[in-house]
Image (tube, rainbow, N blue to C red):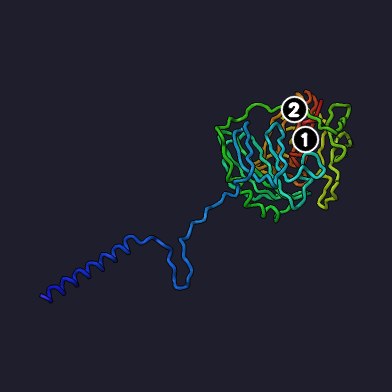
Amino acid sequence: MKTKLLISLVAVLFVSVLYLLYLNFAKKPEVAYVPKTGKIILPTTVPTTTDPTANWKTYTNTKYSFSFKYPQDYFKYVNEYQAGNSIYFAPTEGKGVEMGTPMALTPGDVWFTVDISLAKSGQKSTPKELISLSGPQPVSDFQSVIVENGNAIKIVLSSFSKDTLNKFESTFNQILSTFKFTSTPTPTTSISKVTYKLPSGWQTFSGPANQFTVGFNPSTQDASMQDGIVSIVYKNLQNNPYYSPYAQTQHFQVLPYNNGSRHAFIEKQLGETLSISKDNITSDTDELNIQIAGKNCLIINGVYISQFPTVWGMCVIDSTSALMFNSFNYADLSQHLSTLKF
């Protein structure tokens, strides 16, 4: 009898202990594990990735239906020229030089341009590539071409210093990563018309026999004529050690014209035929058909002949004469083309 009672008590005690243990572990709240060191180990959180372009400004081009972002804290100056077919981004308006020309920038600066042209037959989008252009004032470029539905959008980041350019390589990659077409662009087949505009403070200079006039900024440029050639050259206001008068000059000259091929007319002045096989132009060379003061004009941007300007163009004045012009920089030249009168 005593034995049975003892067994019953032990069984009740054992069941009670199991029940208490169940309550203890089943309803125990979750707490952080505290090791013997006394330090609380909390779950590790995955860091969120921030978008470096989140606070950048968005440039939108409604004419060609594309957009991209750029760091406006550095590229403060933006200028559209050549009837909106080119856009120029720079850190400053030019340190005394009108319209922020690259020639006014220092080796520690970079600038970038966006040029739109009709895509050439078979032209494909190209990844970023490094191109160095020799000349009186060497320039290094990161270039990328994006081709979409007949339009070629060329984005170029440039600097007079290759080391400076390399420092901005990641920025250029981020700019390219934000590029997108906002809708299907329509290829431009009509001739762009350049609207006459003489900026405030500018003066005009007349060519021989008043066949044409062109504007210049007397506070930053000198205009002169010798042997029938009108030259507009930037002054070295910043005492830039890299300054080269030849590289800062735009030339304008009226020459005989037989109403023939405009390409042949330009090639005659160059002294050689332009061809990719001759390495004097490349697949990135742009041809622009524009109308200035009612005259049809052709511009070839990207001519690479030793010591020659890289931009050449002509406007047909009449069946016997044409205006020839050239420059080392398209942005410099375009501001003067908008001041031409015949």
Label 2, on which residue? 195
- Nearer to the camera, 58 or 108: 58
Residue 74 appears in the figure: yes
Residue 71 place in picture, x, y as percent: 66, 46
In the figure, residue 178 lies in which quadrant?
A: top right
Residue depicted at 83% across the width and 51% down the height: 240
Near mark 2 (Cα within 10 A), the count class, few <14, some 14-19 or many ≥20, is: some
Q: Residue furthest bottom?
A: 3
In the figure, 26 relative to 121: above or below? below
Question: Quadrant where the C terminus lies?
Answer: top right
Inspect the image, locate mark 1, and give the three-letter code of the amino acid beneath it. Answer: Gln
State how many labels appear.
Answer: 2
Q: Which mark is residue 335?
A: 1
Q: Secondary structure at mark 1?
A: helix
In the figure, residue 287 lies in which quadrant?
A: top right
- Nearer to the camera, 188 or 323: 188
Question: Left or right: 18 with respect to 120?
Answer: left
Q: Which mark is residue 71?
A: none
Residue 36 place in picture, x, y as percent: 45, 73
Question: Quadrant where the N terminus lies?
Answer: bottom left
Residue depicted at 85% across the width and 34% down the height: 201
Residue 123 appears in the figure: no
- Nearer to the camera, 24 or 309: 24
Question: Left or right: 205 with respect to 169?
Answer: right
- Nearer to the camera, 18 or 163: 18
Q: Secondary structure at mark 2?
A: loop
In the figure, 112 relative to 257: above or below? below
Counting residues from the N terminus, which is met first, the one under dot 1 or under dot 2? 2
Inspect the image, locate mark 2, and give the three-letter code of the amino acid beneath it. Answer: Thr
